[in-house]
């Protein structure tokens, strides 16, 4: 960069010499251009000839004409600015200026012209295409033999690139200097000196940073040789730095300097040209750390005997395992408990001795330890040498590149827990199975009877329509029943949004009277408190509003039935800071919104309270309820991060309270759903159907074809990706199931989004744990079972028209 600038300045000096020579030659007189001349006049006068021939951009202006116009511009100037001679001659130079031109530079140039003196100014001018360039402008007046001002001679030099590079260099230098001065580590650049045999014998400090003296204890060393600063320096330091200077191989090491009485962590590398023999050294004083390590090693030796005794005597499994998953040491309990000798374990991977079903949990535990966290009470099954298995409860602590773990045999405890769990599970499954069988058999009876009746010959159209409607309604009730079961299991896919509970309760309260009847008095209490301005405090929650409304209606219906059609029903909304202890869970502090539904009914016995949320459990008579309403409330509360609590006493009524976490911010108004426009006849929209179930896939393709779509059906995600890869523009939308072997529908949607971002993806599912836990990831979702109308509508929404 400096060479380029020097070369430009030499060219400028040469130009000044040339200008001086031209002045001398024309001192006896100079002829002005002929009348009407607007271009070069090479044969008429020496000044114009010289300006035309030089490769430097040149212009000449005539101050004797109005506004000092340009009367000549050479070819180099025309090439520089992009204008033709006709566009330049006759105009003042100021039209080459623009928004970025500094007014101070313009004023300086104007003052020099007015004073008829030479000036050199760096100014921003503009090309014909509007792009700016930085111009180093040399302007000089030209006088005739009588001393009259004849012309102004202007020489141009485009220095844009050089100024840009200078700026970058200055910025880089500033960053380097800031880092150089700010780092806590010592830093220096040294220049090695070798003898005739090529052995390093000394080095000189070229540059040191402010931290150098603090880290090394040596002051005022810049420019001095190490032999003067530290005559007793060990030869290995010279040899190490000399090898770096000769070979260019960087080194990183820890070493002590006896002459200084310190330990250093050193990183050295060659810089500059090899012939300069310069080495950059970054170092830290680690003397305190080394002394601490020495103390620790001494302490560790003193405790080795105690540790070995505990290691050998422990009945628990003790192990040291690297983060590569391989055992480094095991105690004798492995042989006593599991029958494995130490030589069969050392160097083996830990997962080779873990039950296959527990390896994922073990891998996740390894990730926890890799993150630096302590592991508590991980129960997994370990294989014994005789092929049996033992339940081991592990605790582990990470340390460096490994961790220490202790495992206790909990096989007997697990067996007792499993017996209790199985007993409870059998009872719950029996009740759940009976309830599901009862309700679904009722629904299937309607469907079976309707299909049998539809087969009868000469069936009137009115009856046929009635039976078809009965089947459709029954399917809707079955889907609702399935949704309630998923809600209880906390496996439903929610669509949360922030909304005001008080407003939602008020809207539902308007319809409660229809549900309860005229003999039940309904009261609504909004008790949220007020802010400093006296305004009611908001009760925002982040939950699925439709599921919230369903839960509230279920609690209202339950209260109505408990009062046998007569009494008082109170819905109360308030803020709460504590969820009381319930169902063996401790009380929880936080910021919650509490929605309570109280009735004046008969109340429930204490033994009923423990079972009230079980699916299909009901205290109502046969045919008066499914027993799933409160199960939905329970599942919604849990999946939304809250809780539901019931308080009841015989003869005194019941209160159900739904606790949900309060959300900060403002309520988000749901955007109105725009109905998609109807499709034209024979529209031929191309759909790639991905469905692993043969019956569902056949139905979907047939239904779409009936609606005018062109379909291609594949049975898994990989086939879908292969199909799209072979024909990227052959489809306008992908319609995929979520639960499939191998890659699921959500992963498929993401893969399509990465490779074909303009291709919309619509998902469908009856249930997916991925949807329940993570949502639909922004994809359009059609829930099973779906109708043909639902299928057509969601595809029309997805495909842009």
Image (cartoon, grey):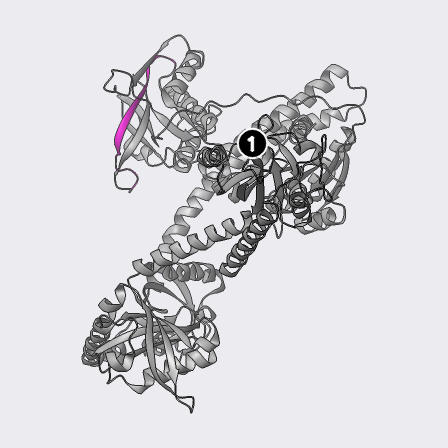
Q: Residues within 10 Å of mark 1 (few under 14, many from 20)?
A: few
- Mark 1 lies on a secondary structure that is helix
Q: Is residue 580 magenta?
A: yes
Instruction: Name the main secondary structure of what is drawn in magenta.
Output: strand
> As drawn, is 118 to the left or to the right of 712?
left
Q: Label 1: which residue? A: 94
Q: Is residue 172 magenta?
A: no
Give the image location of residue 395, x and y in percent. 31, 63
As displayed, is residue 571 above or below residue 51? above
Give the image location of residue 87, x and y in percent. 68, 32
Instruction: Identify the residue at the far bottom of this view.
Output: 197
Give the image location of residue 416, x and y in percent. 35, 57
As displayed, is residue 371 above or below residue 350? above
> As drawn, is 27 to the left or to the right of 344?
right
Which residue is nearer to you in this view: 345 or 128? 128
Which residue is nearer to you in this view: 453 or 39? 39
Q: Which residues are magenta?
A: 565-584
The mark total stands at 1
Which residue is nearer to you in this view: 32 or 659? 32
Report if residue 414 is visible in the image. no
Q: Quadrant of residue 437?
A: top right
Residue at left 30%, top 24%? Answer: 654
Q: Quadrant of residue 93?
A: top right
Which residue is nearer to you in this view: 320 or 604? 320
Residue at left 71%, top 32%? Answer: 86
């Amino acid at each position: 960069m400096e060479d380029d600038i020097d070369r430009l300045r030499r060219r400028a000096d040469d130009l000044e010499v040339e200008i001086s020579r031209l002045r001398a030659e024309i001192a006896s007189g100079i002829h002005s251009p002929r009348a009407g001349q607007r271009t070069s006049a090479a044969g008429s006068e020496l000044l114009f000839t010289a300006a035309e021939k030089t490769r430097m951009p040149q212009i000449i202006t005539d101050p004797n004409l109005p506004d000092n116009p340009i009367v000549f511009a050479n070819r180099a100037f025309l090439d520089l600015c992009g204008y033709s001679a006709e566009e330049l001659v006759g105009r003042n130079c100021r039209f080459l200026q623009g928004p970025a031109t500094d007014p101070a530079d313009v004023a300086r140039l104007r003052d020099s012209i007015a004073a008829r003196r030479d000036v050199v100014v760096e100014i921003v001018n503009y090309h014909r295409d509007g792009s700016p360039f930085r111009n180093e402008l040399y302007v000089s007046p030209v006088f005739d033999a009588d001393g009259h001002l004849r012309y102004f001679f202007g020489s141009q030099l485009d220095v844009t690139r050089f100024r840009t590079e200078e700026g970058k260099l200055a910025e880089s230098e500033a960053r380097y200097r800031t880092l150089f001065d700010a780092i806590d580590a010592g830093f220096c650049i040294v220049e090695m000196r070798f003898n005739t045999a090529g052995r390093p014998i000394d080095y000189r400090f070229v540059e040191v940073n402010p931290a150098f003296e603090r880290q090394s204890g040596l002051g005022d060393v810049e420019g001095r040789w190490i032999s003067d600063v530290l005559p007793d320096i060990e030869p290995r330091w010279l040899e190490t730095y000399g090898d770096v200077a000769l070979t260019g191989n960087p080194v990183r090491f820890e070493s002590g300097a006896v002459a200084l009485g310190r330990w250093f962590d050193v990183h050295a590398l060659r810089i500059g040209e090899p012939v300069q023999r310069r080495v950059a050294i970054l170092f830290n004083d680690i003397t305190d750390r080394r002394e601490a390590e020495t103390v620790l090693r001494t302490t560790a030796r003193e405790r080795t005997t105690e540790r070995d005794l505990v290691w050998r005597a422990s009945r628990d499994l003790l192990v040291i395992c690297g983060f590569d998953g391989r055992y480094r040491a095991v105690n004798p309990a492995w042989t006593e408990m599991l029958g494995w000798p130490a030589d069969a374990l050392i160097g083996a991977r830990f997962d080779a001795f873990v039950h296959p079903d527990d390896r994922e949990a073990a891998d996740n535990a390894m990730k926890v330890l890799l993150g630096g966290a302590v592991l508590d009470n991980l129960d997994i099954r370990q294989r014994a040498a005789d092929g049996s298995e033992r339940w081991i409860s592990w605790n582990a602590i990470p340390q460096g590149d490994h961790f220490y773990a202790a495992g206790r045999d909990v096989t007997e405890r697990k067996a007792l827990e499993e017996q209790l769990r199985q007993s409870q599970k059998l009872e719950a499954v029996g009740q759940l199975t009976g309830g599901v069988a009862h309700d679904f058999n009722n629904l299937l009876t309607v469907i079976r009877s309707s299909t049998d009746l539809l087969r009868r010959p000469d069936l009137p159209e009115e009856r046929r329509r009635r039976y078809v409607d009965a089947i459709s309604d029954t399917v809707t009730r079955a889907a609702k029943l399935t949704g309630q079961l998923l809600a209880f299991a906390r496996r439903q896919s929610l669509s949360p949004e922030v909304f005001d509970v008080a407003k939602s309760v008020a809207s539902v309260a308007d319809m409660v009277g229809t549900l309860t009847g005229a003999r039940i008095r309904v009261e609504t209490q909004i008790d949220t408190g007020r802010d400093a301005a006296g305004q009611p405090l908001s009760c925002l929650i982040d939950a699925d509003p439709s599921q919230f409304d369903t839960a509230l209606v279920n609690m209202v219906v339950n209260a109505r039935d408990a009062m046998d059609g007569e009494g008082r029903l109170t819905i109360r909304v308030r803020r709460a800071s504590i969820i009381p202890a319930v169902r063996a869970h401790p009380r929880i502090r936080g910021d919650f919104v509490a929605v309570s539904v109280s009735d004046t009914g008969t109340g429930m016995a204490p033994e009923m309270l423990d079972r009230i949320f079980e699916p299909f459990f009901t205290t109502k008579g046969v045919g008066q309820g499914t027993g799933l309403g409160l199960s939905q409330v329970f599942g919604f509360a849990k999946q939304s991060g809250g809780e539901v609590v019931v308080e009841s006493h015989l003869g005194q009524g019941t209160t159900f309270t739904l606790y949900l976490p309060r959300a900060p911010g403002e309520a988000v108004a749901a955007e109105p759903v725009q109905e998609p426009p109807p499709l034209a006849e024979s529209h031929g929209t191309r759909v790639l159907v991905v469905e692993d179930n043969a019956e569902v896939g056949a139905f979907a393709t047939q239904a779409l074809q009936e609606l005018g779509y062109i379909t291609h059906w594949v049975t898994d995600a990989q086939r879908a990706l292969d199909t799209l890869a072979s024909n990227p523009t052959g489809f306008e939308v992908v319609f995929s199931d979520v639960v499939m072997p191998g890659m699921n529908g959500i992963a498929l949607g993401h893969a399509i989004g990465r490779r074909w971002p303009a291709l919309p993806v619509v998902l469908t599912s009856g249930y997916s744990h991925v949807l329940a836990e993570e949502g639909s990831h922004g994809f359009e979702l059609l829930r099973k079972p779906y109708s043909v109308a639902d299928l057509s509508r969601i595809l029309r929404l997805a495909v842009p028209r």
